[in-house]
Image (spheres, rainbow, N blue to C red):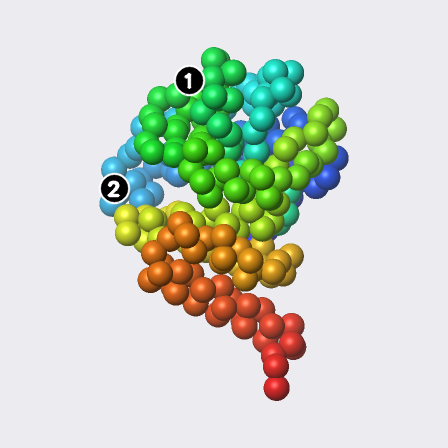
Amino acid sequence: MMATSKENRPVTLPEGVSLRRVAEVLLDAWEAGAHQWTDSPLQLREGAPPKPAMPVPQDALDLFRLLAERRVDYLLVGGLAMLTYVNGRNTKDVDLLMSLEASREIPELEIRDRQDFFARAQFRSVQVDLLFTFNPLFKTVVEKFATKHRFAELEVPAVTVEGLIVLKLYALPSLYRQFDWDRIYVYESDIKLLLARHKPEVEPLFKLLEPHLLPTDMIELRKIVSEEQQRIAKAEGNTPN
């Protein structure tokens, strides 16, 4: 079943949608989050996590407006970017790809935890995950896979389908080694949705990934993508004779 918000609106961000709808997606996801369920199987197994602060739609609006007003170079990635390409993918935070210097142009963005090329930050009530361009692959994504999606109030720089696939494939081997099954299944599902809906050319994407991943990781990623492409082709009646 396609995920819907509390007003039966599809969880998607078509071209030209109001920026306020972007903010409402964050709130909708929070309202249906795991922290809202009492004595759920997840809570009984792992304990009740700290309840995150409720995101305020106005805060998300202000974040994007500040980025635009201060002419900050960034790229929207992650769950919100996915919603410009597929239905039914919800998200609780904002993912931005930018340089470390660019992040300092928004001092209101409080960085709370930084590890290597990533940081978790907070803009008022909104959680923001940052990816930094001093990772060479992330810099390549900015240079090769940037587009803009027009929301009613402004144009938002966003990653392309190909860029999303690169980022998610790059993340998977690390998630496998951490046994982070929740994120593994989300990322694999995202990749499969993008392959099915948009049918991008994937071999150039693998070429970009090769210098940044182990050969054994590349073999496994190629296998995942190849099997999914075959499944899609079979479902659409395009299986080679």
Residue hosting label 1: 110
Tell me which amino acid carries mark 2.
Glu
Residue 223 seen in render: yes
Tell me which amino acid carries mark 1.
Glu
Above or below, comparing residue 57 to residue 21 in the picture: above
Residue hosting label 2: 46
Answer few, some or many: residues within 10 Å of disc 1's Cα (few below 14, many 20 plus, some between 14 and 19).
some
Answer few, some or many: residues within 10 Å of disc 2's Cα (few below 14, many 20 plus, some between 14 and 19).
few
Residues at marks 1 and 2, CA–CA distance in whole angstroms: 28 Å
- Is residue 2 shown left or right of residue 31? right
Above or below, comparing residue 183 to residue 36 in the picture: below
Residue 25 sits in quarter: top right
Q: Which mark is residue 125?
A: none
Q: Quadrant of the C terminus?
A: bottom right
Residue 187 seen in render: no
Give percent across and percent down for residue 163: 56, 46
Q: Observer-nearest residue: 23 or 95?
A: 95
Q: Quadrant of the N terminus?
A: bottom right
Q: Earlier in the sequence, mark 1 or mark 2?
A: 2
Give percent across and percent down for residue 65: 63, 19
Above or below, comparing residue 92 to residue 178 in the picture: above
**Residue at the spot 43% in from the left edge and 67% down from the top edge:** 223
- Is residue 232 shown left or right of residue 154? left
Q: Observer-nearest residue: 186 or 72?
A: 72
Between disc 1 and disc 2, the foreground one is: 1
